[in-house]
Image (cartoon, rainbow, N blue to C red):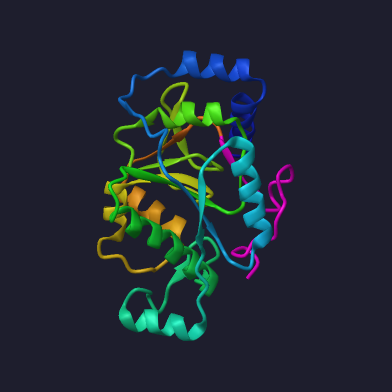
Amino acid sequence: MFIKDIIWFTCATYPPKIHTFITKHLANRKIPYQDLSNVPIVCINLPKRKDKRRFIEQQSRKHNLNIQCIRGITIEPIQRARLVRKGLVNLHAQSRARKNQLTNKEIGCFLAHMTIWDTLLTTDEPAILILEDDAKLNTTKKELIYYLKRVPKKADIYTLNLRHAKRTVLNYNTVKITNSIEGLTAYIITRKAAKKLLTNLQINEAVDEYISSQLQSKNLNIYGSTKDLFTETSTRANLFSYRFKSEIQNH
């Protein structure tokens, strides 16, 4: 798996000519696309993380993007108890990755994403692009729009940050996620996906694990760009982009 990741990173990143040759000659499926270049962009930001808000606002100005910051959610133990009594959070909610009880920070993160999904359904927008406040745009606005104009019509979710997700390359622009996603740094969610995810929802696991479960149950179609258009800057594992201490990973 590690060797595969190195090969993919090399082909998808350095140099662009290799990326073009590989994707054009090894995969060239025709896919019906939809244009989501005018999709609203929101960013989840905890009020206390003013450093991350400044980071997002700087990128917004630099790339001339209209990014609306949405207040993140912090919950205390007493609030968690109320959510359990209401049935929204499972008493034994557990992170599959850590094999431990879901933390209040992870539940707050889930609720923040869930709130945006719910809000989407109250609008006339077909989809929304959600960023977490450690998302760094790796490309130009022109290239970002290029990919946003080529979101598969079948996509429920379209990720712009692949990480180690298992994928099938469909063509020069598009991959299909086949098993799970890791993190939700930058993704587009459609109205139909929001409706699916909110139906009979109870928080049993982390939000990216929940989406992965829905993918594995074949309840969602998840696609992505062939390159990481955004990078997470809050993980020490990513030596070249690490910038911020994570609120989720540092419990």
Which residue lies at the image location 36% right of the left edge and 30% below the top edge? 35
- Residue 172 in the figure: left or right of residue 85: right
Give the image location of residue 129, x and y in percent: 44, 45
Q: Quadrant of residue 240?
A: top right
**Residue 140 placed where, x, y %?**
60, 30
Q: Which residues are magenta?
A: 228-251
Q: Is residue 32 visible?
A: yes
Q: Is residue 243 magenta?
A: yes
Please name whichever residue, 123 or 191, is drawn nearer the observer in this view of the structure. 123
Q: Please say if 113 is above or below 39.
A: below
The N terminus lies in quadrant: top right
Residue 240 position (above or below residue 10): below
Which residue is rendered at x = 74% and y = 46% of the image?
Answer: 239
Horizontal side of 92 relative to 64 (left or right) equals left
**The C terminus lies in which quarter of the figure?**
bottom right
User: Residue 227: x and y, percent?
Assistant: 55, 31
